Amino acid sequence: MKNGICGGCKKAPLVSGYRMCLECFLKEKARSAGIGTSGWIDLYEKFQSQRGRCALTGRDIDIMSAEVDHIVPKCKNEIDKEDREKIWDTIENIQFVTPQANRGKWMGTNEEFGEMCVDGTVVYLQEIQKKRVDHE
Ligand SMILES: [Zn+2]
């Protein structure tokens, strides 16, 4: 690998801290997301449309460390298998999220993630309340 030049395409400059240029990086991400390497531009536009924010938490993300999440997961049994397969690997079914949000959402939908966050917040607030009561 030449210094500072992408080992994949051998022409574009590396993104600082990574071994690939942005285009090659996004091609790899698009391929593993199931939309094919040509979908890298769609991924780039999707990121732009999210204005650098996680689709689930609104936290700041950067395109290199953000994770690609499928809005409707592949293993969502409530949704008809045929419908699921039709939409699963399309750019419309993809969103950029923080790695933490991706872990939390796992095989759920956006709505289930939201409900889980609300439940988690309630438990968290109850714990704080309990601690306050204990101190009184
Ligand atoms: Zn490259």
Image (tube, rainbow, N blue to C red):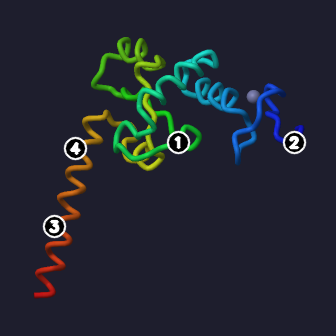
Q: Distance between the residues labelled 3 and 4?
A: 17 Å
The tag earlier along the polypeptide, 3 or 1, is 1
Q: How far apart are marks 3 and 2 (CA)?
A: 54 Å
Whole-number angstrom distance, CA of label 2 to CA of label 4 = 48 Å
Instruction: Return the residue at label 1.
Output: 62
Disc 4 marks which amino acid? Glu
Task: From the viewer's side, name the closer residue of 5 and 100.
Answer: 5
Q: In which quarter of the image is residue 39?
A: top right
Q: In which quarter of the image is ligand 1?
A: top right
- Residue 26, image x and y in percent? 62, 28
Residue 136 relative to residue 69: left or right: left
Res 115 label? 4
How far apart marks 3 and 1 lie (CA) works out to: 34 Å
Nearer to us: label 4 or label 1: 1
Task: Count how many numbered circles sit on residues in the image.
Answer: 4
SS at mark 3 in the image: helix
The three-letter code of the residue at mark 1 reads: Asp
Residue corresponding to mark 2: 3
Figure check: 38 above or below 73: above
Q: Which amino acid does label 2 sit on?
A: Asn
Label number found at residue 126: 3
- Disc 4 on helix, strand or loop? helix
Give the percent coordinates (x, y) of residue 11. 82, 27
Is there a contact, CB below 8 Å, between mark 3 and mark 2?
A: no
Query: Could you say whether the residue bearing mark 1 is in a helix, strand or loop?
Result: loop
Residue 78 quadrant: top left
**Amino acid type assigned to the residue bearing label 3 in the image:** Gln
Q: Which of marks 4 and 1 is nearer the N terminus?
A: 1
Compared across the picture, whether 133 is left or right of 41 comes to left
Q: Do the residues labelled 3 and 1 touch (CB within 8 Å)?
A: no
Marks 2 and 4, the one that precedes in the sequence: 2
Residue in the image at 66% along x and 32% along y: 22
